[in-house]
Amino acid sequence: MNQALKSLLDLLDLEQIEQDIFRGQSRSAVVPRVFGGQVAAQALVAAGRTVPAERHAHSLHAYFLRPGDPGAPIVYTVDRIRDGRSFTTRRVVAVQHGQPIFHLSASFQTYEDGLEHQAAMPPAPDPETLPTAAEILPRYADAFVEPGVAERLLEAREAVDLRYVDAPPFGSVGTPKEPRSQVWFRTNGKLDGVIDEPLLHVCLATYVSDMTLLDSVLLAHGRGGWAVGDVVGASLDHAMWFHRPFRADEWLLYDQESPSASGGRGLGQARIYTRDGQLAISVIQEGVVRVPR
């Protein structure tokens, strides 16, 4: 486990300051706001800490309300909406400087047997055959709108080994493509020996899920995103369904596509599979996607 992953785990280890009230810190952001995946993951940690351990997160629905300040702590307040015989529901509001910046509803369930089927995993090359972020990002340094963007992107991804199957949006500027993107990801180190509970793996996947989901929107229009200055974007809402157990320190395939973009917004939807083909997570996100004038 490298230091970046240790720092990420520390970031998710919230401080409890009162019953159902937690405080989280932020890490330096690639853009001048708190990374949305961090807020979503921390909010899910806060919700999960008020739920019995035998109940596991099966869904979340969230709205990003305001940009977060990476220089200030975030306070998470949890409402215990319902504790039923099988399901538990929690609502979390993240607050900074006296204002809500994020809202999350999460549902947890006691495990039970039921009907089983899933969509088949799409074809993808083995992750070991693909370049790492350290290998791929310097290739595009000259295209980025500001000096040092490649280094900041690389720093932001040191905790997670994320590998693009095809060229990322910033490597495909000017060439519209099919609105689909695939990446493999896992934590940059094994999680054995740390607080190795199902909630941790779910929260880490939530963190990563906000990194690339709108890439397919950009690919459809030959846009490279904020890094090359041809799009202004931000997450608006985010939903995830956790279908089957998985480990965030083992390879997961993030298969993403965009069915629509309009009105200054783009929609991304995705499925996350374990390496052996199990459908683990479904994800949908809408974000602001504006062309600067």
Image: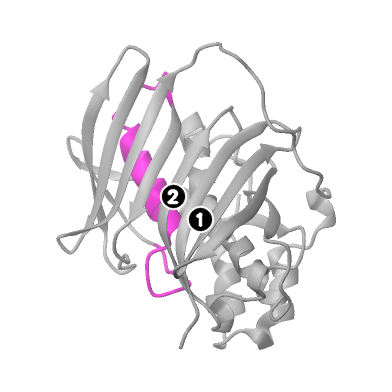
Mark 2: secondary structure: strand
The answer to whether residue 124 is left or right of residue 249 is right
Q: Looking at the picture, does residue 119 appear above or below residue 12?
A: above
Q: Looking at the picture, does residue 134 appear above or below residue 63?
A: below
Disc 2 marks a residue whose amino acid type is: His
The answer to whether residue 26 is left or right of residue 195 is left
The answer to whether residue 39 is left or right of residue 192 is left
Start and end of the magenta stretch?
A: 27-56
Q: Which of 65 and 290 is in front in this view?
A: 290
* Whole-percent x, y for residue 279 in the image: 65, 33
The colouring scheme, among rainbow, by chain, secondary structure or one colour, is: one colour
Please name the residue shown 27% across and 38% down the image.
91
Please identify, in this view, whether the residue under mark 1 or under mark 2 is nearer the observer. Answer: 2
Is disc 1 in contact with disc 2, using a CB cutoff of under 8 Å? Answer: yes
Q: Nearer the viewer, residue 119 or 264?
A: 264
Q: Give the numbered dot on residue 210.
A: 1
Disc 1 marks a residue whose amino acid type is: Asp
The answer to whether residue 49 is left or right of residue 181 is left
Any part of residue 111 in sight: yes
* Whole-percent x, y for residue 62 in the image: 37, 47
- Which of the marked residues, 1 or 2, is nearer the chain's N terminus? 1
3D distance between C-alphas at marks 1 and 2: 8 Å
Residue 120 lies in quadrant = top right
Q: Looking at the picture, does residue 285 appear above or below residue 27?
A: above
* Whole-percent x, y for residue 184 in the image: 70, 51
Please name the residue shown 45% across and 70% down the image.
264
Q: Kindly identify which residue carries mark 2.
A: 238
